[in-house]
Amino acid sequence: MYADPLEQATKEFAELLSAGAQKLGITLGQDEIEKSISIPKENYDISSTLPFYIAGKIRKDPAEIAKELAEGMTKGKYIDHAVAVGPYINAFFDRREFGMLVIRSVATDPEGYGNNALGSGRKVIVESPSVNPSKPWHIGHLRNAILGDVISNLLERSSYTVEREDYIDDLGLQVAESLWGYIHLPGKPDKKFDQWLGEQYVEVNRMLSNPEIKKEIDDLQKEIEEGTTENARKAREFAEKCVEAQYQTAFSYNIYHDVLIWESDIVRARIFEEAMGIAWEKSILEKPETGTYAGCTVVNIKDIKQVVSGLGDVESEAKVLIKSNGTSTYLAKDFAFHMWKFGYIPSRFKYVKFMEKQPNGKPLYSTAAEGEQKEFGNVDMAINVIGSAQRYPQLILKGIFTLLDKKKGVDSLVHLSYGEVGLKEGTLSGRKGGWIGKERNYTADDLLQEAIKKTKEIVERSGRAFAEGKADEIARSVAVAAIRFEFLRVAPEKRITFSWEQALNFEANSGPYCMYAYARAASILEKAKELKAPAQEDFDFLTDGYDYALVKLIAQAPRIIAKAAREYRPNVLTDYLLDISSTFSKFYETMHVINSGEAETLRLAIVGAAKTTLGNMLKALGVEPLEHI
RNA sequence: GGGCAUGUGGCGCAACUUGGACAGCGCGCUCGGCUUCGGACCGAGUGGUUGCGGGUUCAAAUCCCGCCAUGCCCGCCA
């Protein structure tokens, strides 16, 4: 169903190797052989370390084995011939056949090229970024949101059905603080609502040292949690206004969701009570009558340790789900919510359209007190994009869930942990509001504005101009590409120390660089008189240069997407994008396409396939490829 | 005290999960390239005991053990 040119070539190579091993009197399984095969960066098309493996089975010099295997190899459809280099077997493709295969793979379904069958229809819910509804997104939240978005894209392109969910904690202390500020402080909203809330929140935080105010806020939070009073209604209204504002930021970065789940609705839907019932039935809960946890409902840590590792020596003996005063902990709510995600609890949520239409054309649903039934949840896999600081609670959650369901807990609940974003001058602490204010602004909105400014400067300096009337749109796209790429090129688990200089890099190794390669490809195709499908003979005009290098790179797209999705590592994608962009740039500088005589048909086809591949990869990155930037 | 993550040329990163052929890329620095498809470009050069010490292996940045440094976490908070 999905084209994967390398799959066929690899399979054939494996068969030829298998036949060779057979002659040496060794029978090997397909997977044993395929494990030894790799695609080298240069010099050869496909390689194998099989001689080492065979040498381990029979007493013989691997170089000798390589020689025999290479010399004995017959020509296949895609494999032309092989040479032994020391103990390695390196093979060359039949370029006519392989070239045709690649170009055709792209042309058959251009939109879908790069997609693969990895997920085969399984349903996954991706939770991100779950920012408190009391402040604007800062660059740390942005990293989360971008990670979640791209992982979702990658999974979608890998045949998963993806639900993009955002969990809104509208019962938290932060919302109570904001509401208290609104009631008691003189300032009223006079700018983007999340920004205003954030500034006010800093203000309230300063007043927290006053125990009376602290007490008032705590009471307010309890009131909100009970959910019946005017203040509770007001808190939700507040939070909704804030989320609306935050989503303006999301949209400006091409980030979209399917559904918002509000904590107040989880409470309202009484999912929690049902979850506890099931947990009692599965006898994973205890209610000690004496000791530290007297009167609490808890899970024993010993039990958790039996199913997950990496907790270390934990001092406490149990994790509390229901406190002795009868209220539930965050962990308990999260546990209940995950039971909903995995379909243990029939959905009692009601949904409304929070937004009729996001810029991507789709509605954004939200849980609500009243509304329609929808089929959200009940998934095969849940991915939570959450900072590495929350590793421990996430591991506990996974442990408890595993006690409930061994298979799903271990395999299907994924904490996609990422390193926090810091600043040279210190940490991004929402509590102290160090990232907001007049002097230092590290909000996602500000970052985008800076990047847009830089984009416009670059265009101005180059003496070119944006397409008529499209300056803002193009500048935003390029800016988004720069920022997304910058956050994604670093492996998720690594911390990022944010620097403006690095974030606003538009040269090689950047999102704009990749967009530029795409635009150049588009430009060639625009100027071409005629585009036609190449015949096999056209591939005789392939050289050893960048044209063939491009063909080989294009062939890798489906595997790259699958690898990035399987490992939850978008930097696999950015690496590849860079590789293919840079190879295209070299091709562009050194080989002419238009009016290149007999080679023109082939080269145009390669440019076309490269453009399609680059375009699909940029889309996976969350960037709309533009033909003119 | 324990757990987890990170440590790769001056700087930012990749390769580690699944051990393989001279450790890749960008920035910086030095030098060079626009009368042919878009200079947000391309080429050449500079720069590395992969934190340290052991071990396993034909082969270690990669696996194992120990140590050092940095960060985060270990609540009847959310």
Image (cartoon, grey):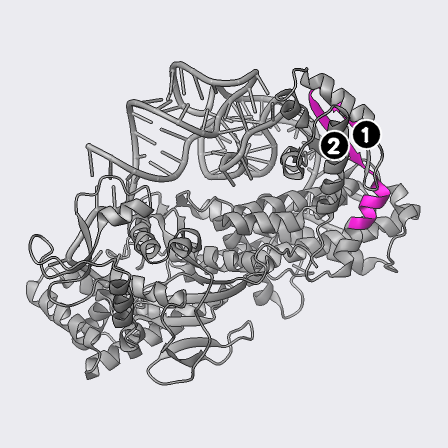
| Mark 1: amino acid | Met
**What residue is disc 1 on?**
A73
**What residue is disc 2 on?**
A17
- Indicate the position of residue A430 as horizontal and vertical percent values: 28, 57
- Would you say residue A87 sits in the magenta stretch? yes
Nearest the eye: A479 or A94: A94
- Indicate the position of residue A24 as horizontal and vertical percent values: 74, 23
Q: Residue A574 carries which label?
A: none
Query: In the picture provided, is A20 more to the left or to the right than A482?
Result: right
Mark sitting earlier along the chain (2/1): 2
- The N terminus of chain A is located in which quarter? bottom right
- Magenta span of residues: A81-101
**Mark 1 crowd level (few <14, some 14–19, many ≥20, 10 Å Cα):** many
Residue lying at 35% horizontally and 80% vertically, measured from the top left: A368
Query: In the picture provided, is A493 more to the left or to the right than A287?
Result: right
Query: In the picture provided, is A561 more to the left or to the right than A310?
Result: right
Residue lying at 42% horizontally and 54% vertically, measured from the top left: A407
- Which of the chains bears the disc numbered 2? A
